[in-house]
């Protein structure tokens, strides 16, 4: 993709009305645009990152037996009144139709998926079933802040699993826990498996936390074993459950949460099945959430330096940033265009900066945008290509064939 064709608009300076690192970098780098507090547009560059995150999540949910669907964001009030959360869910956005009727704008989907399942579950033979969606959610946050870490409109994956027994639910809980660890490993996020209060549904839930100064949660964790406990359930006496060592206090961002719903919503919606003996029984369930847009904000928050973002390779908008310098030279222009075409033909995602701009401006934008690899073609490269990684100072001169080989083989 060519820089000018892709409509990328970087800023020389970070926005003054943002405090968090991720918001400053993502806005300045042309990934997102702020419409209002906690409301952002994902620009073409940012949408590529978000899509890559969601594709990784989707692949691992599918591998864990999840079936994707898409539920409505507009919820008739009657379903929320059945569970009692119409009045008790503090962040619930509500609206009235001009033609009668009240609605909730979906922050979560228990009130929708349970009545949905009543159409499809009648026997133990219909279970287990695991359904998920990746959707835009809405919450009336009192203090929308920290860029993509705390929004009023955000993207989320939520999966619900339904079972004949608590034992089967717990077995699948472990399947999903491992799936989450695979996801975060692919995203290169160093997560802490954190025990936390499950509130209404369970004595304990498990959060996946990423240590970050801007994080809203305080956790106590073992840096060695990557497990911890949320401040809400911390007595001050706990030791690491694995190694027995002391715990470190830190601020963290919750990027995922899994917990058993047990029979709570099944009781509300009378979601039952007939067991092997023909007896009616309530369905057991589990819930598994992961904030995909929050993951994007978290990655920008933790993967950066003084010059800009350093995207993990798995979610970077492009694999290579190709910079054409000395563009007034017909020879350089022809070489850059030829190299760009060869890269595309080799299946490499490349952003080609063909702008009539100074070298300093192009280098600054490349560092700000944080694409993993950079290639420079100029009069100084003498028919070769200057190649470096975003987070390395080492520069190498290579031919186009070697450049492609390095990119496709991850050769350092």
Image (cartoon, rainbow, N blue to C red):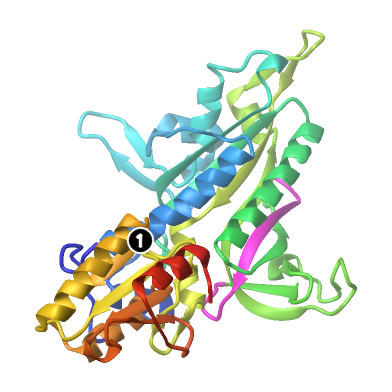
Instruction: Note whether 59 is above or below 389 in the view shown.
Output: above
Name the residue at 65% across, 49% down: 179
Q: In which image quadrant can residue 183 be found?
A: bottom right
Q: Is residue 409 above or below residue 390?
A: above
Point out residue 343 in the picture as x, y percentages from the top left corner.
Answer: 32, 63
Identify the residue shown where x is 31% and y is 56%.
345
Q: Secondary structure at mark 1?
A: loop
- Where residue 122 sits, quadrant-wise, is top right
Q: Is residue 245 left or right of residue 101?
A: right
State the residue in front, 276 or 402.
402
Against 200, residue 141 (above or below) is: below
**32 vs 281, nearest the viewer:** 32
Q: Residues within 10 Å of mark 1 (few under 14, many from 20)?
A: some
Q: Which residues are magenta?
A: 200-216
Q: Position of residue 171 (x, y in %)?
A: 78, 39
The residue most toward the right is 244
- Which residue is the site of mark 1? 349
Residue at 26% in and 91% down: 380
Q: Say which residue appears at 77% left-offset and 40% top-offset.
A: 170
Residue 140 in sight in this render = no
Question: Of residues 273 and 269, which is closer to you in this image?
Answer: 273
Q: Is residue 75 located in the magenta-colored stretch of the structure? A: no
> Which quarter of the figure has residue 208?
bottom right
Say which quadrant the N terminus sits in. bottom left
Q: Position of residue 161 (x, y in %)?
A: 64, 34
């Amino acid at each position: 993709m060519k820089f000018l064709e892709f409509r990328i608009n970087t800023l020389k300076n970070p926005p003054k009305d943002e405090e968090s690192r991720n918001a400053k970098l993502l806005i300045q780098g042309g990934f997102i645009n702020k419409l209002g507090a906690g409301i952002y547009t994902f620009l073409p560059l940012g949408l590529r990152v978000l899509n890559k995150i969601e594709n990784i999540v989707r692949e691992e949910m599918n591998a864990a037996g999840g079936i994707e669907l898409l539920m409505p964001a507009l919820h008739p009030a009657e379903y929320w009144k059945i569970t009692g959360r119409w009045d008790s869910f503090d962040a619930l956005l509500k609206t009235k139709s001009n033609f009668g009727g009240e609605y909730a704008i979906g922050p979560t989907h228990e009130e929708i998926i349970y009545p949905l399942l009543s159409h499809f579950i009648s026997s133990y033979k219909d279970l287990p079933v695991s359904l998920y969606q990746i959707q835009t959610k809405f919450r009336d946050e009192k203090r929308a802040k920290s860029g993509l870490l705390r929004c009023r409109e955000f993207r989320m994956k939520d999966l619900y699993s339904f079972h004949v027994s608590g034992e089967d639910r717990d077995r699948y809980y472990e399947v999903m826990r491992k799936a989450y660890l695979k996801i975060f490993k692919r995203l290169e996020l160093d997560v802490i498996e954190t025990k936390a209060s499950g509130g209404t549904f369970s004595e304990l839930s498990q959060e996946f936390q990423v240590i970050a100064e801007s994080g809203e949660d305080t956790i106590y964790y073992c840096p060695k074993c990557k497990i911890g406990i949320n401040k809400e359930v911390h007595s001050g006496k706990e030791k690491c459950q694995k190694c027995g060592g002391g715990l470190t206090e830190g601020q963290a961002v919750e990027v995922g949460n899994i917990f058993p719903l047990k029979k709570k919503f099944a009781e509300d919606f009378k979601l039952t099945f007939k067991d092997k003996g023909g007896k009616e029984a309530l369905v057991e369930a589990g819930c598994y959430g992961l904030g995909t847009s929050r993951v994007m904000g978290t990655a920008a928050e933790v993967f950066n330096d003084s010059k800009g973002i350093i995207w993990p390779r798995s979610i970077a908008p492009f694999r290579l940033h190709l910079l054409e310098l000395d563009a007034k030279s017909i020879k350089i222009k022809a070489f850059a265009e030829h190299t760009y075409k060869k890269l595309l033909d080799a299946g490499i995602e490349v952003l080609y900066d063909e702008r009539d701009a100074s070298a300093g401006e192009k280098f600054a934008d490349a560092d700000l945008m944080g694409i993993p690899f950079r290639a420079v073609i100029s009069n100084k490269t003498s028919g070769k290509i200057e190649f470096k990684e975003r987070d390395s100072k080492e520069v190498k001169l290579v031919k186009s064939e070697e450049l492609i080989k390095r990119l496709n083989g991850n050769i350092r």
